[in-house]
Image (cartoon, helix red, strand yellow):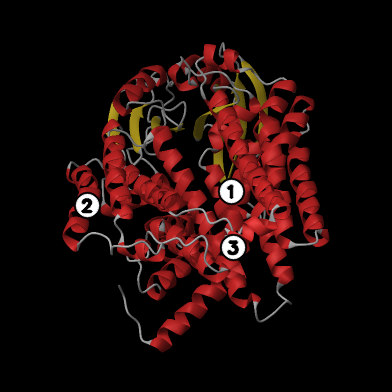
Amino acid sequence: MISLPQRETKLMVAVHGWSGILLGLLLYAVVVTGAAAVFASEIGIWSAGHVGSRSAFAQPMAEAVRRAGEETPAKYREAVDLFEIGDHELGAYFHHHETDAEGNLIARGIFYAFGPGGEIRERREGTDEDVYGARNDNALEHFLVDTHVRLHVPDPWGLLLTGILGLAMLVAAISGLLIHRHLFKDIFTLRRGAKPVLFNRDRHSVAGTWSLPFAFVLAFTGSFFSFYGTVGVPIVAMAAFGGDVEALTEAVYGTPGKPDPRPETALGLDRAMAHAIQRAGDVPTFAAIENFGRADAKLTTYHAPAGGGLAPVSLVYDATDGTFLQDKPLIGPTPSAGGTLAGIMSPLHFGNFAGMLSKAVWFGLGFAMSYVIYTGLRLWLARREAGSRSLEWLERGVVVVGFGLPLALLACAGAFFLSMPAGTALFWVPAGFLMVSALAIGLGAAWRDVAGLAGALELALGVVMLALPPLRLITGGPGWTTALEAGQVIIPALDLALLLAAGWLLWRVFGRLGQRRSAQEHPVLQAAE
Amino acid sequence: MALAIGAVVLSTAALALLCLVDPKRLRALRRKGGGHGGGLRWVLVGVVVLPGLALALAGDGAAFMVWLGAIALTGWFVTLAASPRAQDGPQG
C-alpha cells in the first residue's frame, strides 16, 4: 500500500482524527439520515398508508390538465410541472419564473391537485417552496430528507454546511487510505477479544476499508449536490450570463426550438405518456411542459435509469400532438461527457438506478458509513481514555448521538402516526424529534456509566422499532392483507424490516444482560474460562 | 438484475474462502498454519473480481454498481461472521 514517511503519516493521522472529531457527530447525523432517506419515498408510502400502486402518469391526464389550464391566468402558463402527490394522485403546478426581493430565482403560480376521476380537488396559489414543501401526509418523509440535505439550517447555509461535511468525509477517506499501511492485509482481521484500542481500531478499519470506494462516491456526489445550487450555479451565471440565473437555466436545461406563440391545446399528453412509459420501461418520476397552451409546447418526461444504464432518461415530446422529438441529455441539447457525468450523480448518490435492489445495497452502504464514523469516534476516545478522564463528556455525547439520533428519528414516525389523522403532523414530527432528543441528552447526563447508557438507548431503539408496526395499525394504517390485495408490498416489507431489526437489537441487549448476570452468579467459572 | 445477484453470490462465496485462509486473520486467532499459499489466494481474488469485470465489460453499469456495493457489504459481513465473539470483548 501507499507508504508515507513517518512525519507525513503522523500529520495524516492528526488530519484524519481531528477532522473526524470536529465534524464527526454532524457527519454521522447526515449519513444516518441519508441511509434512511434512500427509502424516503417508501417511508412516505408506509407512514401515510398509501396503498395505491398505479401511477397517475399511467392514467389519462390530458383532459384534467387542459381544464386546469383554462382556469389559469395566462401569465402562469409559461411552464407546468406534473408530479404525483398523496396516494398516486396527479398534481400540476402552472407557474412562471421570477426573481424575488433577495435576487433568488423562484417559481410562482397555481397548484392543482386532482382526484382519481380527474376532478380538481385542491387549488392553491403560491411559490415553488409552498408547493414542494412539507404537507401533513408527507411530513415524516420531508423531515427525514430535510435533515439529511440541510440539517434544518436555512438556505443556503444548511446546504453549505452539508457540502462542507461531504468534503470532510472525502478528507477522512483520503487520509484514512494514506495512513493505513496494511489496507488489504488487515481486511479480514477483527480481534473482538483484544484490548479496547485494538478492538475499536479493527472494527473501524475493517468497515472503513470495505466501504472505502463508496465513501468517495457518496461524499463527492453529496458535496456536488450541496454546492451545485449554492456555489456552482451563481458562479457560472455570473461568469457567463451576467448574473441572470433564469437565462442560465434556460440555456442549460431548456429545450431549444423556434418560438411559436400561436394558441394550441396540449392534446398529446396521454399519447406522449403512453409512448414514454413504453420507451423508458417505467412511468416518469416527474414531467414538465414548456409554453403550455401554445403551438410550441413541449413535454419532457423524466425517468429513473433503465436498461442497465446509470444515467436517468429524459424524453421530449411535442405536447400538442404527442409526437416523440428526442432523448434529452440532462445538460444541453445534445449528449456530452459532462451531461452524462452530471446525469449519473443523482443515481450514484441515491442508489435508485436498479429498483429496490440497488436501494437496499445503498442503504446498507449508508449503514456501513455510519458505523465507520461511530467506531472512528470511539477509537479516538479509546486512544485517549488512559490519559484523560475529562473526555468522558465527549464519550457520553458520542453514545447519545450514536443511539439517540436513530431513536429520535424513529420517535418521529411514532409522532407522525399519532398526529397525522388530526392533521397536525407538520408540528408533531419535529416536536417528537426534539422531545426524544432532549430525553436522550438527559439520560446521557444522568446515567451512571457509559456502557449502561449505550445499552439503555439500544434497548429503547429495539422497543420503539417493535412498537411502530402495531402503532401504525392502531392509528388507522392499512393492514398487510389490505396492502397486499392492492398490490402494495412496501407497507408489509417495512413493517417486517422494523420487526426484524427490533428482534436483533433486543437479542443483543438481552444476550449481554444474560452474560453479565452469569458472570455475577459464577465469577469463579468465568475467571477460569 | 438476476445477473447482478448471481455475480454477488459467486464473489461472496470466493470472499468467504479468502477470509477463511487469510494468514493475518489466522495469526490473530493464534491458529496453527499460516494460511494457504499466495497461489490459491490469487485464484480466489480472481474469482471475486471476475463476475464484476464481466458485468462491466458487458456494459451493464447498473449491475456492476450493484455488484460493487453488495460485495463491499458482504465482505464486511463475512469478516464479522468469521471473527469469533469474545466473551470479554468490549461492547458499545
Q: Label 3, on which residue?
A: A161
Instruction: Respond whether the residues carrying marks 3 and 1 are from the same subunit.
Output: yes
Which residue is found at the position 49% from the left and 35% from the top?
Answer: A79
Instruction: Respond whether the residues carrying marks 3 and 2 are from the same subunit.
Output: no
Q: Secondary structure at mark 1?
A: helix
Q: Chain of mark 2?
A: B
**Three-letter amino acid code at disc 3?**
Leu
Which of A452 and A377 lies nearest the eye of the viewer?
A452
Say which mark, if any, is on residue A33: 1
Say which mark, if any, is on residue B44: 2
Relative vertical location of residue A350 with respect to residue A58 in this rendering, above or below: below
Mark 3 and mark 2: Cα distance apart in space: 43 Å
Question: Where is residue A492, by image quadrant?
Answer: top right
Which of A75 and A255 lies nearest the eye of the viewer?
A255
Which residue is found at the position 48% from the left and 44% from the top?
Answer: A363
Q: Position of residue B47 (x, y in %)?
A: 21, 48
Mark 3 and mark 1: Cα distance apart in space: 15 Å
Which residue is found at the position 64% from the left and 33% from the top?
Answer: A138
**Three-letter amino acid code at disc 2?**
Leu
**Three-letter amino acid code at disc 1?**
Thr
The answer to whether residue A56 is visible is yes
Relative vertical location of residue A402 with respect to residue A128 in this rendering, above or below: below
Q: Secondary structure at mark 3?
A: helix
The N terminus of chain A lies in which quarter of the figure? bottom left
